[in-house]
Image: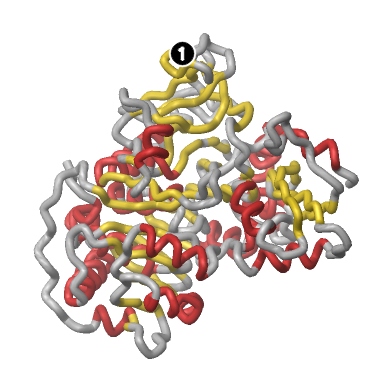
Amino acid sequence: MLDHIGQIPDRAAQKFKDKEALVFEGQSFTFNDLNVLIEKTAGGLHSLGISQGDVVTLYASNSCEWVVSYFAIARIGAVINPVNTMLTPTEIEFVVKDCDARAIITSADKVVGIMGVKENSNVSSIISFGDAPEGTISFDELISRNLTPPPMVVIAPETLSTIGYTSGTTGHPKGAMQSHKAVITNGAMTSQVHMRGPDDVVVSALPCPHVYANVLMTGMMMFGTKLVLHKIFDPTKVLQDIKVHKATLFDGVPTMYMFMLNSPAFSEADLSSLKRCYVGGQTMPIATMLAVEKGFGVPLYELWGMTEIAGLGSTHPLYGENKHGSIGCAIPYCELRIADVDDVSKTMPRGEVGELMVRGPIVMIGYFGDEEKTRQTLEPDGWLHSGDLGTMDNDGCVYIVDRKKDMILTGGYNVYPAEIERVLAEHPDVALAAVGKQPDEMKGEIAKAYVVLKEGMTLTEQNMIDFCRKSLAAYKCPRKIQFVDDVPKTSTGKIMRRELYTLDND
């Protein structure tokens, strides 16, 4: 049994040797190739003084170097901090300072924007894929030092491996701490349930920092699957690579499937090699699932997960019924239950709505530096609050019916109203702002802001959206702004987000 993530590539190289492992933008790498690159990168990081327990922020676009860096950080016992590339430098600085990162690995398109982060934090090194400005180190230079790789670190499976930040309802990100055991278990069990193996080829454009993509990477290494990775999602290029590489599997979020179905290239696409498709990140309407299955000619399986469980918590095993509208049942060695929202010690009868809770080795250690939030999310007996409301049928399959909190799922990304409201409130002409969600055909949901201006002030919708873009990642910015005289409130003055729709004029 593997003790930590850093052992995975070494084991893969021994088992799968010169079998093709990863394809990225025309470059092909075997399992041996990847392991050599990972050892060189680990040696380079070690030479910079990065050691066991140090946090390394990984803020870069999808690439071979991203995959290599992920495993290299783990190989020396350092802690991986994968960060969404859509975050702004201000947001990155918060994360880096909060987890006390000692190094940042980034890409050429991001490095200039974060140079100031080094000056305002304990970061000692910035490594850049591609061009490296003064004061940074190029990735190519790092791996060309021909250093002897440090000995494989010896650490317990329960040791901290990853800090993945997820937006908080207070508007500040929370760092979910994941053990090596959690990440390995999730990758292994997901691949086993999906029956992924050396004969499979997966095409993916999922962002590498997301836990869904992490599951694919660890599963690829453990089970010898070939991964065809895309830098960004382009429906035409994805459809082309499914044909060229004879992909057997495709993993994506709902919007990816919709864009592919609507692509002019879809009618000419050769999808005959596909065996199955998987969708996660957001629930998909049954009618849309059926349209995807008809168009792609293969079953589409829905799955569910979250950062706090290092990936997936439920999916549909191939030996069971694929129930459309359901996120499936618990992955092996884990438990799911529907709890009474007023008394989580009680389990709801089958078919009745309650909060979905998770328990098992995949559950996070807690939130980094936030004991109070950890206590609110993790019960003493190990059950984790998901924040989702759902039901469970007699087969143990779960159906998500609503969200306990006000989180907005837009194109597979989590967006929290409080974070947007906090930014809007900083505008000098805004008296009050509230953010709700609206259904959207392409993205599932979008954020809509309801803004009360100070007396005598005048602003346009575009003014407010542009203001938000200065402080928020693009996917977090509200897509619509409506100016109102007031917003619904409770008797204590609390904004009633679920009543905001009553103000809609569109």
Question: Picture coordinates of residue 238 (x, y %)?
Answer: 57, 60
Q: Which residue is nearer to you in this view: 376 or 315?
A: 376
Establish if 225 lies above or below 129. Answer: above
- Report the residue at 67% width, 54% height from top: 260
**Label 1 is placed on what type of residue?**
Thr
Q: How many marks?
A: 1
- Report the residue at 40% width, 30% height from top: 384
Question: Picture coordinates of residue 205 (x, y %)?
Answer: 52, 58
Residue 431 left/right relative to 147:
right
Q: Determine the image quadrant of residue 330.
A: top left
Residue on which the image places disc 1: 347
Establish if 166 lies above or below 302. Answer: below
Establish if 467 lies above or below 483. Answer: below
Residue 341 left/right relative to 369:
right
Question: Picture coordinates of residue 176 (x, y %)?
Answer: 38, 46
Q: Quadrant of the N terminus?
A: top left
- Report the residue at 55% width, 58% height from top: 243
Question: Picture coordinates of residue 304 (x, y %)?
Answer: 50, 36
Q: Is residue 272 visible?
A: no
